[in-house]
Image (spheres, rainbow, N blue to C red):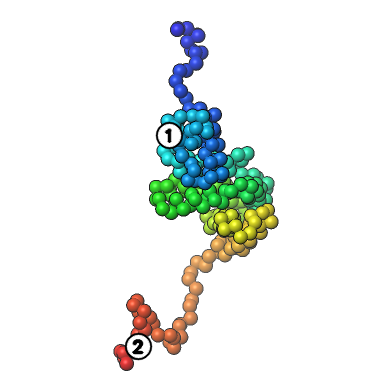
Amino acid sequence: MTGPAAATAPRRGRPRSEKARQAILHAAAELLLNHGLGAVSMDTVAEQAGVSKATIYRWWPAKETLALDALENEWAVGASDPPDTGTLRDDLLALLHPWAHLVTTRPYARVIAALVTKAHTDLAFAGEYVARLVTPRRDRARTVFTRAIDRGEIAPDAPVDVALDLIYGPLYHRLLHGHAPVDHAFVDDVVDLALHGILAAGPARLHIPATPTTHTEANPVTAPETSLNGSRSREGGNS
């Protein structure tokens, strides 16, 4: 075929199908949530998604990496860019409230616990776990803090990574242990306490003394020094 018709002819081949990819992720997520990580196999996922195993292996080399993407895909449903409400506190609440509601509607805690266990016994998988699940969630929250710095709400050198740990740590602690609910009131308290610490530390981080402070001479009457092997030195040798 030549001429204008050739230029408009559809390209042949088998491009990756987003519909098939979503079917695979959905099937894997349902197996994860209903039966746990042990129930996820390429055979079962292929059967439930209506695709071949070869199709699955084109995207995921192992069931664990498929599980990671399935979980992140479930959490990303309806997600958009981090909200910009005009304040750091409201941005964080707008980001975290929907997540807190989502993770308590189905047994996500069991899935996360299984993935964390796998990450601590498989170094290769640990890297995938951080890259595919941990980092994307932290990056979305990091965007919120970057906006706050640009607005002048917090210091330019605010410890953002520590702040993210202070916020996500308590949320995952409750989710995994199940000793108390991960509800909106708890999210509010976590955000408020974390921001209180960040804002309180702001002036101190911005006004670091140019010279070290002068320390008073230590009192010579102190407890005996302890050697590396744990024994106390005695003046004049052992008695």
Badge 1: how crowded within 10 Å, few (<14), some, or many (20+)?
Answer: few
Quadrant of the rendered structure where residue 76 is? top right
Q: Amino acid at mark 1?
A: Tyr
Disc 1, SS: helix
Q: Which residue is mark 1?
A: 57
* Percent x, y of residue 58: 43, 32
* Percent x, y of residue 237: 30, 89
Q: Amino acid at mark 2?
A: Arg
From the image, state whether disc 1 or disc 2 is nearer to you.
1
Quadrant of the rendered structure where residue 71 is? top right
Left or right of 49, for residue 199: right
* Percent x, y of residue 50: 51, 29
Q: At 60% across and 62% down in the image, what residue appears? A: 197
Quadrant of image for the N terminus: top left
Q: Which residue is mark 2?
A: 234
Quadrant of the rendered structure where residue 206 is? bottom right
User: In the image shown, does 215 or 187 lie closer to the viewer?
Assistant: 187
Quadrant of image for the C terminus: bottom left
Q: Residue furthest bottom?
A: 239
